[in-house]
Image (cartoon, rainbow, N blue to C red):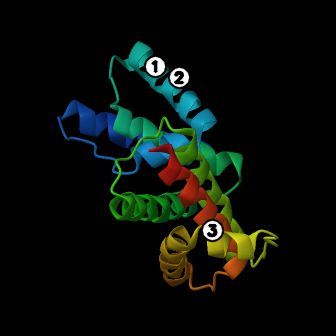
Amino acid sequence: NSHIHIGLSDHISFAMKKVDIGIDIVNPFLNEIQTLYPNEYMIAVKGTMLIKEKFNISLPESEIGFITLHIRSARVNGEVAQSLKYTKIIKEIIDYVQRVLGTKKNQKLVEYARLVSHLRYALDRIENDKIPKNVMLESIKSSMSEEFEISKKVCEFISQKLLKEVCEDEIGYVAMHIYRLRQSY
């Protein structure tokens, strides 16, 4: 997307000014951004290395996350606001799931990455009215009943944020990922 040239340049310029005058850049979504967009994150890391080399300004890791969102948006021909919207929703969901399960965020766990990744694609499916068929739904409801209840609350939250209904099949898939995450601790 050619719009990245203006948007990203403007963003980097502003970030460099903030760093230069000593303003902290805070990114509460950094873990989720790293997990959701690992390829774009690595590109952003390389970009900040070039900035350091050319301008002798070290952008903090939190800023690398924001640059990642610009790169991601350009790659999918979308808006930064959409990527940020999904990232915010996923962070709130992960925080909720971690609280309910009594666990700490561990982005190195494969199950954590799978849940985050599934949520990203689920948000896209829900917004675009794509309904997955979950042939394991009845089994999930009976064998993972606690996780299914957690998932129902998660999907109610998603429904409120996206103003779309979440089908029971999707609730089952989210429950399965929550179950796997719980088993990994």
Q: Which residue is mark 1?
A: 49
| Residue at 48% over, 35% down | 108
Badge 1 amino acid: Met
Residue 168, quarter of the rendered image:
bottom right
Q: Residue furthest left?
A: 22
Of callouts 2 and 3, which one flags the residue occurring earlier in the amino acid sequence?
2
Which residue is at the front of the view, 53 or 152? 152
Which residue is disc 2 drawn over? 46
Image check: 142 left or right of 156?
right
Relative vertical location of residue 178 with respect to residue 172 in this rendering, above or below: above
Q: Is residue 126 above or below residue 65?
A: below
Which mark is drawn over residue 143?
3
Callout 2: helix, strand or loop? Answer: helix
Instruction: Bin the neighbour count of mark 3 within 10 Å (Cα to Cα): few under 14, some 14-19, many 20 and up.
Output: few
Given the image, on which type of amino acid does mark 3 rest? Ser
Q: Position of residue 135 (x, y in %)?
A: 82, 70
Q: Residue at x 32, y 22 (%)?
A: 57
| Mark 1 residue element | helix
Find residue 90 and report its horizontal and vertical position in percent.
Answer: 49, 60
Which secondary structure, mark 3? helix
Residue that appears at 69% across and 45% down: 75
Location of residue 61 (image quadrant) = top left
Mark sitting earlier along the chain (3/1) = 1
Residue contact between numbered discs 2 and 1, judged by CB atoms under 8 Å:
yes
Residue at the far front in the pictured view: 143
Mark 2: few/some/many CA within 10 Å (<14, 14-19, 20+): few
* Crowd class of label 1 (few under 14; some 14 to 19; many from 20; radius 10 Å): some
